[in-house]
Amino acid sequence: MDKLGVLRQYFGHSSFRHGQEELIDNILSGRDVLGVLPTGAGKSICYQIPAILLGGITIVISPLISLMQDQVLALNQAGVPAAYINSSLSYNQCMEALRRASNMAYKIIYVAPERIKTKAFIDFIKKVPISLVAVDEAHCVSQWGQDFRKSYLDIADFVSAISPRPTLAAFTATATRHVKEDILKLLSLKDPFVLSTGFDRPNLYFEVRHDKNKDDTLLSIIQKWQGKSGIVYCSTRKNVNKVCDFLRKNGISAVRYHAGISDEKRKQAQDDFQFDRADVMVATNAFGMGIDKSNVYFVVHYNMPMDIESYYQEAGRAGRDGEKADCILLYSKQDVIIAKYILSKGNDRAELEPLEKTLLEQRDAERLKRMTFYSTTKKCLRNYLLAYFGEYINEDCGNCSSCIGKSKLPKFSPKTYVVSSGNELVFAALRMLRNRIALSKKLPAYIIFQDSSLRDMADKMPKTIQEFESISGVGDKRKEQYGEIFIELIKALDIALNEGKLSSLQEAQNIARDVFNAYKT
């Protein structure tokens, strides 16, 4: 099977996105690569397809447990044998996973960077052929990056100790020139193919609001999206608690996440959000690096972040499935005071030389100044963000509050209702069926199908398996598992539309419920 066959069979796509094919070809030829692709551009496919085609095992080094679990769930659903080994597993579970991996039961194994120095993992590496090591969130290797992880500095030695040396592929979504140089140097990439597809996310709308009452503005944003998933970032735990309580009092299904909450409660909050049991996650920046939830329709920053890198990465968690999404910053002068206070407390830099410490403090101050400029500029917001990462476009974007000239945010109230078109009602019914299937299988809904796939179904209305195969994101495994039930729902919806019996959300949901119950029994 070739790369296009793998793309079609396992991932349900008929063509590659910009940059994917070049990165895949270079990896398959044995050349190291650095891919700088925006969030939602399909970075994971760039190493997953080579992993399926190459003879040995691929090791993916990833910084967050939640990301590993999501990726492995998605791969297994697509029919790719994959596993993760991290601290969420017991010692016996880790050893069993390594035993199975030693017997070549998996094509892809996800590990945290700390894992690569353990004796058990080093012993495992010596027993099996390793064809590829992929480094996700590669900017974590750089102290110039906003998410520096010291354990990433061990990756270069780990790779060089493997015989024969595997291909090394590094990926990130946000990298300034300094960070990119650090990735190349500190990971010891050899004669790498370097590709940056640009940082622009055309589906994202950017806005800065200076409203005096942030709570009312936030409520309007959430009501606009009517039960869709969104994230609200706050700079302090106190604000997280305050905002979450405010939203709950106003009937919003919200959960909270910050470092002051127990591990058990944080996991529960994340699961509730991932599984669509809660619409809104209110969190500090402790939540979300590498979060893989695709159907996030808005990201609101209740407070201004401390740097553009953090803002663009956090805002970029919206619209990962390509759907239109809002990225809105609620700015006040008090935010600058809070940010300066947090910076004055400093990170743990006790081991640094005085000069290096001074340079990092100067860097932080400059970053905060650039973030403040973004929050107050009247110029195109997208151009400002892209220029920060060294990318320039000659015209205004037409999709930010500066270019539009006024806020596009409507004045919604709790009594505002939207009349849905037939297409939107079909989409709503498809979402409900997907959510019921996900609940029954204890999987996040987007692991079954992403919203973009459901949109394609609502547009094309496939009524045969052959037609269903043309839907974006439907590979062989998903077609076998879910094709029949979704086709049955689409047929039922088509009949209801033709007979004039599909005019409300409740009718759409009733049809989805009946189809699900018929198949369940």
Image: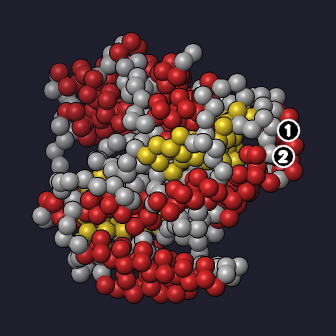
Residue sitting at x 54%, y 18%:
2
Whether residue 222 is visible to the viewer of this picture, yes or no, is no
Residue 423: x %, y % from top left:
22, 33
Verify CB contact (< 8 Å) between mark 2 and mark 1.
yes
Q: Amino acid at mark 2?
A: Ile
Whether residue 177 is visible to the viewer of this picture, yes or no, is yes
Structural distance between the alpha carbons of marks 2 and 1: 7 Å
On screen, residue 383 versus residue 64, left or right, reads: left
Q: How is the image coloured?
A: secondary structure
On screen, residue 515 versus residue 269, left or right, reads: left
Residue sitting at x 67%, y 79%:
352
For residue 126, which numbered disc appears in the image?
1
Specify the quadrant of the image occupied by residue 270.
bottom right
Specify the quadrant of the image occupied by residue 142.
bottom right
Q: Quadrant of the N terminus?
A: top right
Q: Amino acid at mark 1?
A: Lys
Give SS at disc 2: helix
Residue 105: x %, y % from top left:
75, 28
Residue 251: x %, y % from top left:
34, 64
- Decide: few, some or many residues near mark 1? Use Cα within 10 Å; few <14, some 14-19, many ≥20: few
Residue on which the image places disc 2? 122
Give SS at disc 1: helix
| Farthest residue, direction left | 405
On screen, residue 415 versus residue 190, left or right, reads: left
Residue sitting at x 58%, y 52%:
184
Residue 273: x %, y % from top left:
48, 54
